[in-house]
Amino acid sequence: MTTKIDWAQTEAGSAYHWPADPAPGTIYRVIVSGERPLLPEMGELLSATMSTSAVDPEPVSSLFRYVQVWANSGESIAAAKASQPRLIAECVRVGMIQGPSGVPDYGQVNLAWTCPRGAERVRVYRLSSGDPSGHGADLREVEPGSTNLAGCVDRGGEAGTTYTYRMVVEARDARGAIESSDPVHLDVEWPAVLREVTDLTIHQMQPPTKFEPGIVNLEWTPPSVGTCIIFRVDQPIVAGIVGVEVDKGALPQMGLTDREQCRNPVELPDGPGTAQMLGVVWPPNWPRVHFVPVTVLGNRALPGKPVTDESIVPPGDPRLVDRVTEQVVTFVWPPGATYVRAHVGPIGADATSVCGGTAFCQVSEEDYRRHGGMRFSARFPQDAAIFLTGVRGEVTSAASSVPFAKRLLIHYSVEVRRRYRVGPVDHARIVLWAPHDQVTGSPPFLAVFRDDRLPMHAGDGKVLEAVPDDTPDAVRSLVIKPATLMGGQGSPRWRVLIPGGSARGYVRLFVAPSVGVDRLSKIVVLDPPVAQLRWGS
């Protein structure tokens, strides 16, 4: 009774193994043939050996390759050669298919090969790529009702997936038994039509500033095939690449490198819906950001419709310079802004509410550079602030603000009174007022006189005595301190006495130095025309 020869494929060829014959002094003859030999002389001698293994370097080139082991036993080699051969082991190998190929063809894969003549059928199995053993759950036979001798068509795969196809030749040997060949494996990527992402949306959560990044959330509909990756760039992508499929290795040439790829986790929907990428950084000081979706499958890449968002950083480091008759606001011009608009509102007010109204004024960058800032000739309440926003088209930046200078602006007028129509000056009458109704109280003032020139400060000349004009006999004082500055030009007058009835001279009003340096810096006294301060020739 014969046993089955075991064999395995090695680099040297097919290695055959069989059980040892119990008879002593056995010589084994390994015979191969395209038909089953009835005697060892009917086949080709592969090996004569005393071991229980042999290597067959030749592939199976026909439908069958019969392998038999015949044993000759004897007390000596000569006796063994003279003894009758006994068939102790055999197997039959079936020829494998040759030249397998798989071509994707719009929703199906066309498989083709060359089968050994006389084969009964070729069984084809589709299994998950990476599991050629076929032990995985995803093992499906393709066209089980066909012989598949020249090939077959597979229509049951999933687009975009790579499968391993296993082809096994079956043939019926001379005894009527069905024998199978070794399997041949072929990896094929199933055809898939890539679709670009066209609905990428940006939700701005926090705008960037000059030094701090912004935050956005991205949302899109996932493509049915492949994976969508997102790139973030500061310049528009080159024209002509949207919707054009390219090799993935060509993306860096388009400015879409690994450095620009957004690496935030993607939240995919369980079913139909949108994917999200949350907390994507908008780099600081970028007036515009461009996000480019790219559908990727294997080495294929398809850029989708880019989406752009704009943001302007607020005008930086605003400062106010008070030039008495006008106020100038300087700031760092926001990159990309066409204009900077100014709104006026209370200090500490909500910037969104203040800037939602009509702008007080706006300035272009050219005018800002020409004039050295944004200029205001109007005076504003002491508790007001100016809110600045950068504007480009429909895009408006967040606001930066600076309070108006808290300075007390005081006007006064001087009226010279002579003792006679054309005689020496007897006294001068002074009226003080502030232009804002909300001013309460008044600092002390000094009226300073010089007969040779205009006094420059409170200590530059003689301080004149003063009394209320409506009570000229009151006790004289060197300090003028009105009860209020809210009466305008109709406020009570003060009479200042000119020494010796001078024929000429200059009188000028100053805040008394006793108020202190800090408070003095917040009070501005505006002189009337010089003609009121001077009399005589």
Image (cartoon, rainbow, N blue to C red):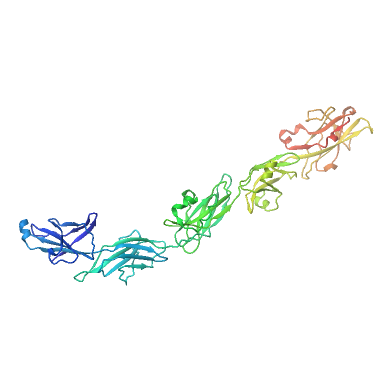
Quick one: quadrant of the C terminus? top right
Q: Which residue is drawn at 30% across and 70% down?
A: 147
Relative to 486, residue 3 above or below: below
Tell me which corner region of the image, top left, top right, bottom left or bottom right, holds residue 522: top right
Tell me which corner region of the image, top left, top right, bottom left or bottom right, holds residue 514: top right
Q: Position of residue 330 (x, y in %)?
A: 67, 41
Quick one: quadrant of the N terminus? bottom left
Q: In this rendering, would 161 be left or right of 327? A: left
Q: In this rendering, would 151 be left or right of 457? A: left
- Residue 475 visible: no
Q: Residue at x 72, y 35 (%)?
A: 521
Q: How many marks?
A: 0
Of 150 and 191, the residue lying toward us: 150
- Residue 413 visible: yes
Q: Position of residue 118 (x, y in %)?
A: 25, 69
Q: Where is residue 475 in the image (x, y as percent from the top left)?
A: 86, 32
Tell me which corner region of the image, top left, top right, bottom left or bottom right, holds residue 436: top right
Relative to 125, residue 437 above or below: above
Q: In this rendering, would 479 be left or right of 347? A: right
Of 530 and 240, the residue lying toward us: 240
Q: Where is residue 154 in the image (x, y as percent from the top left)?
A: 37, 67
